[in-house]
Image (cartoon, helix red, strand yellow):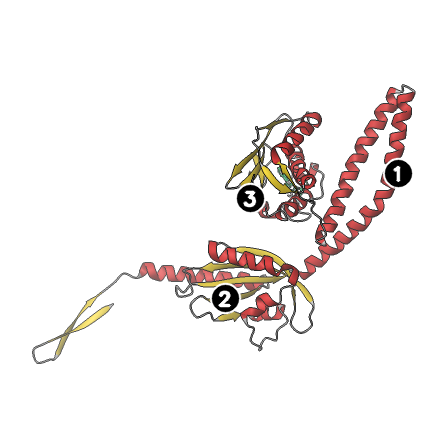
Amino acid sequence: MDTTPMKAQDGKIIGAIGSFADITESYLLHQEAMDKEEYLSIAISSANLGTWRINAKTKEFTASARLKEIYGFDAEVEMPYAAIVSHIEDSHRDKVFEAIDIAIHSGEVYEMEYPIIRLYDKKIHWVHATGKLYQNSINNGIPHFSGTIADITERKMDEQRRSDFIGMVSHELRNPLSAISAYAYLLGKRADKNNDQTLNDTASKLARQIKRMDAMINGFLETARLGEGKIQLDKTNFDMADLVRLAEEESLATITSHQVIFAPVEFTPVHADKDKIEQVILNFINNAVKYSQNETVINIACVTENNLAHIYFTDQGMGIPQKDQPYIFDRFYRVESEQMQHKKGFGIGLYICKEIIERHNGKIGVKSNEGHGSTFWFTLPITAS
Ligand code: ADP
C-alpha cells in the first residue's frame, strides 16, 4: 500500500490518500518458490547430496558442508571453486569441462560420473555430479550456476568387483569353449562323411549354441575392458551404406520371426571402427527382435542430417517405461516388469553400444512409447568426401 499525507492550508495533516495493489499473486508465487526451495532442501539432505552455487554477477562461490566433506575438506576450511575441478582425476577432467561448457551455453543440465582425488587423504572417490545455469530463479532473480554432487564410491566399487569377477570368469571359460568348438566341428565332419543326418543336425545345433556362448563371453570381456578404459578402436574410412547392406544380408539370412525392412541408404562416408559399428547395428537389431512380438515390423534407416550419419532402428515392441529410459544405457541395467521376466539378458549390450558410439564422438539415444514400440538411434560424424 502507498500513502501520501493530505494536508490543510496551514500544513496540518487532515487525512491520507492511499492506493492498494493486489499482491496476492506475487505473494503466492513467492510462497510457492519458498515451498519448492524447502522441498528441494529436504530432498538434498535426505539424498546426502553436496551442493554448490556460483553467483553469476559476483562470482561468489558457496559450498555446502556435505560437499566439503565429499572433497575431503574440513567444514571450517574455505573451499574455492577451483577445487571442484582441480580435484577431478586427470583422465576425466577434459570431459567434465566440456560438459560444463555445454551446460552453460545451452542452459541445460549436465550430469556426469567421474573420480575425484580427495584433499588430505588423497583417496579416490567417485561422484555423480549435476549442474545448471539458472537465469532467473528463486535466488532474488540473480542468475547463478549451481549443482549437486553425490558420493557414489560404494556403488562404483561394487560395479568394479562385479566387472573384475565377470572378466576373470569369462577369460577362464574361453579355453574350454574353443576346445568344445573344435570337437563340434570334427563331429560335423564325421557326420558328413558317414552321411548321418541326425548327427549332422546335432552338430549344427551344437555349433549355434557355441556361437551364442562365444558372443556372450566376448560381451562380458568387452564390458570388463570398457570398465578399465581399455577398448581399442581400429578406425578406417568406409561407407555406412555398405555396412547397413551387410547387416541387411545378415538379417535376411538369420531372422525369420520378424519383418526387417531396410530403407535405401545413400553414400555416407565415415571414419570409424567398422567391426565395432557393425556390432552396434547388430545389437540394436537383435534387441528389436528380442523385445517385440513375432511377425511385427522392424524398420532400419540411415540418413545424413547436419553432417552426421543418423541410424534409426524402430520396432513395434513392448517399449520402455519413461522412468527407465534415462538408465537403459547404464551397465547391467534392465527394465523390471512382468514381460521382462521371460526375456533373458545381462544388461550390457546397450552399455557397450554407448561406449563405442561415444568414443567415436557420436551420440546415442532412444525414443519409446511403452506398449507401442521404440526407436533406438545413433549418430556418427561424416567425413569430407
Ligand atoms: P539385455 O537385452 O541383455 O537386457 P541391453 O543392454 O541390450 O541388455 O538392454 C538393456 C535393457 O533395455 C533391456 O533389458 C530392456 O529392458 C531394454 N531394451 C533394450 N532394447 C529394447 C527394445 N528394443 N525394446 C524394449 N526394451 C528394450
Q: Amino acid at mark 1?
A: Ala
Q: Is residue 189 above or below residue 374?
A: above
Percent of width and height locating residue 165: 79, 52
Q: Amino acid at mark 3?
A: Gln
Among numbered discs 2 and 1, the one appearing first in the sequence:
2
The circle on residue 53 is 2
Closer to us: 368 or 323: 368
Name which residue lies at 55% across and 62% down.
Answer: 148
Is ligand 1 within 8 Å of the beta carbon of the residue shown at mark 1?
no
Q: Amino acid at mark 2?
A: Arg
- Left or right: where does residue 205 sit relative to residue 122? right
Q: Residues within 10 Å of mark 1 (few under 14, many from 20)?
A: few
- The nearer-to-camera label among 2 and 1 is 1
Is ligand 1 within 8 Å of the beta carbon of the residue shown at mark 2?
no
Closer to us: 345 or 99: 99
- Left or right: where does residue 100 sit relative to residue 252? left
Label 2's element? strand
Q: CA distance from mark 2 to mark 1?
A: 60 Å
Among numbered discs 3 and 2, the one appearing first in the sequence:
2
Percent of width and height locating residue 352: 68, 45
The N terminus is located in which quarter? bottom left
- Left or right: where does residue 241 sit relative to residue 54? right
Q: Are marks 3 and 2 in contact (CB under 8 Å)?
A: no
Label 1's element? helix
Label 3's element? helix
For mark 3, what is the residue? 322
Give the farthest residue toward the left.
Answer: 9
Percent of width and height locating residue 84: 58, 67
For mark 1, what is the residue? 179
Quadrant of residue 287 in the image? top right
Name which residue lies at 42% across and 61% down.
Answer: 137
- The nearer-to-camera label among 3 and 2 is 2
